[in-house]
Image (cartoon, rainbow, N blue to C red):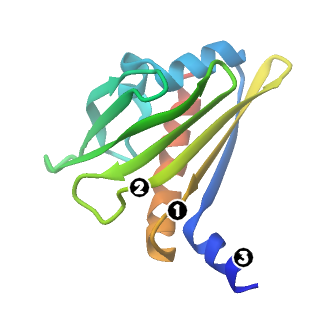
């Protein structure tokens, strides 16, 4: 039972249904020019998004807050299955979060696509709460693209 409680403290899930075909949604999640439009929470922007979309390829997302502070997330793609699924490591240059894992599934729902994001192996409940807020805000920007 403690294992389940611990897993819930170190993982999160965010889901959204997008009114667009799966291929288009997958592209918007992975093309640098699209990533720059949604991959930073709240008032933050994404001036730099680098994507090498292949197993073993790296990505780097530089987020900037209105006060100019920059935060960089980066990782390596472990699985790339267009337009169905992505698995990649997630780490922050300025944080203890270094080797967490993000899985994004793109489920065909007729004329829409359900995006299911799971972020696992976060260090603690506080990190989980911060990432839940961040991913939720990013997902709202992502939905707004469509």
In terms of sequence position, does the residue under pointer 2 or pointer 1 come before the other?
A: 2
- Residue corresponding to mark 3: 4
Asked whether, in this view, residue 80 is left or right of residue 47, the answer is right
Task: Estimate the x, y position of residue 83 in percent, counting from the top left.
Answer: 66, 19
Q: CA distance from mark 3 to mark 2?
A: 20 Å
Asked whether, in this view, residue 49 is left or right of residue 144, the answer is left
Helix, strand or loop under label 1: loop
Write down the quadrant of residue 58 in the picture: top left
Asked whether, in this view, residue 63 is left or right of residue 57, the answer is left
Name the residue located 48 percent from the left edge and 75 percent from the top edge. Answer: 124
Tell me, for residue 121, which label it has, or none. 1
Q: Sort mark 2 into few (<14), some (14-19) or many (20+) by Cα contacts within 10 Å.
A: some
Tell me, for residue 99, which label it has, or none. 2
Would you place residue 125 above or below residue 114 in this image? below
Image quarter in which the C terminus is found: top right
Asked whether disc 2 touches disc 1, contact meaning CB atoms under 8 Å apart, the reply is yes
Task: Estimate the x, y position of residue 131 in percent, counting from the top left.
Answer: 47, 58
């Amino acid at each position: 039972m403690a294992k389940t409680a611990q897993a819930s403290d170190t993982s999160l899930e965010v889901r959204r249904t997008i009114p667009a075909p799966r291929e288009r949604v997958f592209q918007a999640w992975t093309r640098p020019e699209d990533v720059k439009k949604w991959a930073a929470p709240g008032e933050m922007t994404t001036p730099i998004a680098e994507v090498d979309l292949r197993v073993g390829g790296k990505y780097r997302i530089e987020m900037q807050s209105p006060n100019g502070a920059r935060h960089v997330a980066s990782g390596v793609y472990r699985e790339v299955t267009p337009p169905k699924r992505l698995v990649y490591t997630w780490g922050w240059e300025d944080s203890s979060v270094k080797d967490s894992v993000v899985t994004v599934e793109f489920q065909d729902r007729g004329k829409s696509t359900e995006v299911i994001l799971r972020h696992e192996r976060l260090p603690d409940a506080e990190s989980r709460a911060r990432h839940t807020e961040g991913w939720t805000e990013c997902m709202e920007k992502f939905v707004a693209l469509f």
